[in-house]
């Protein structure tokens, strides 16, 4: 399973990229607004520090204008994946861009029917929003299971499923159990994934025991000569 980081915070992206655990980045207009920077220079900086796909979203609602915006975004770097909404115009734009070899991430997917249309339009990625479905009392992960089952019936579909609107580590674990291709995860949820009180307690106990030995692994004198 691939991990994308869902943020426009360049410092968070750099920090997580240094771990070797991140395969790509997703952004959207809301995240870009929170970053408080000009959009295109921000995408340039993100693409410069990560080699995987970087999703950058169009702001137009008409297909022809989406395509024009998308070509500008795709020209920023070869790893840009243009995000378009799952609307009639978004699918038209997806088809045109995909036919020209531009990666497209069709976003705001909330039903299996929509996901089928995204795959038919040639999307490189489709982003079902599980958290927003949970918010209205639906079961977001059921959508992921349905889409993965449907896509599995058709080997010609090359669209990868990005589990989006991830709210907590359980979403990630359930996505992995289902077999989703990618989870795009906010930095705070990534932090929660490795934090566990028993891990912290164990580390503290090991360090206390080691301190009692008064040794250092880095000290070259801390060796024994064996016969």
Image: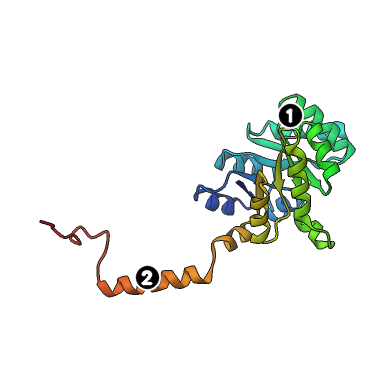
Task: Please identify the quarter of the rendering in which residue 219 is found.
Answer: bottom left
Which residue was labeled with disc 2?
A: 206
Q: Is residue 19 left or right of residue 4?
A: left
Q: Position of residue 21 (x, y in %)?
A: 53, 49
Most distant residue in the top direction: 100
- Quick check: 73 above or below 219? above
Frontmost residue, 143 versus 99: 143
Callout 2: SS: helix
Frontmost residue, 79 versus 221: 221
Which residue was labeled with disc 1?
A: 156
Q: How many marks?
A: 2
Task: Please identify the quarter of the rendering in which residue 75 is found.
Answer: top right
Q: Is residue 42 left or right of residue 92?
A: left
Q: Which mark is residue 27?
A: none
Residue at image point 65% right, 45% down: 182
10 Å neighbourhood of mark 1: few (<14), some, or many (≥20)? few
Q: Position of residue 98 (x, y in %)?
A: 75, 28
């Amino acid at each position: 399973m691939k991990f994308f980081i869902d943020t426009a915070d360049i410092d968070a992206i750099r920090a997580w990229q240094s771990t070797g655990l991140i395969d790509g980045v997703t952004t959207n207009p809301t995240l870009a607004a929170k970053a408080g920077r000009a959009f295109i220079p921000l995408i340039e900086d993100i693409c410069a520090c990560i080699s995987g796909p970087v999703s950058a979203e169009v702001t137009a609602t008409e297909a022809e204008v989406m395509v024009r915006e998308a070509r500008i975004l795709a020209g920023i770097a070869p790893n840009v994946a243009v995000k378009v909404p799952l609307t009639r115009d978004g699918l038209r734009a997806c088809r045109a861009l995909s036919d020209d070899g531009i990666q497209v991430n069709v976003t705001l997917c909330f039903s299996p029917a929509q996901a089928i249309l995204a795959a038919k339009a040639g999307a490189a990625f489709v982003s079902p929003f599980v958290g927003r479905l949970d918010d209205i009392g639906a079961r977001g992960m059921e959508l992921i299971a349905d889409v993965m089952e449907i896509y599995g019936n058709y080997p010609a579909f090359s669209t990868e499923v990005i589990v989006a609107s991830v709210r907590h580590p359980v979403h990630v674990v359930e996505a992995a159990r289902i077999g989703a291709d990618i989870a795009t995860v906010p930095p705070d949820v990534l932090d929660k994934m490795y934090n566990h009180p028993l891990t912290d307690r164990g580390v503290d106990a090991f360090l206390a025991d080691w301190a009692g030995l008064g040794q250092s692994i880095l000290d070259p004198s801390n060796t024994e000569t064996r016969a």
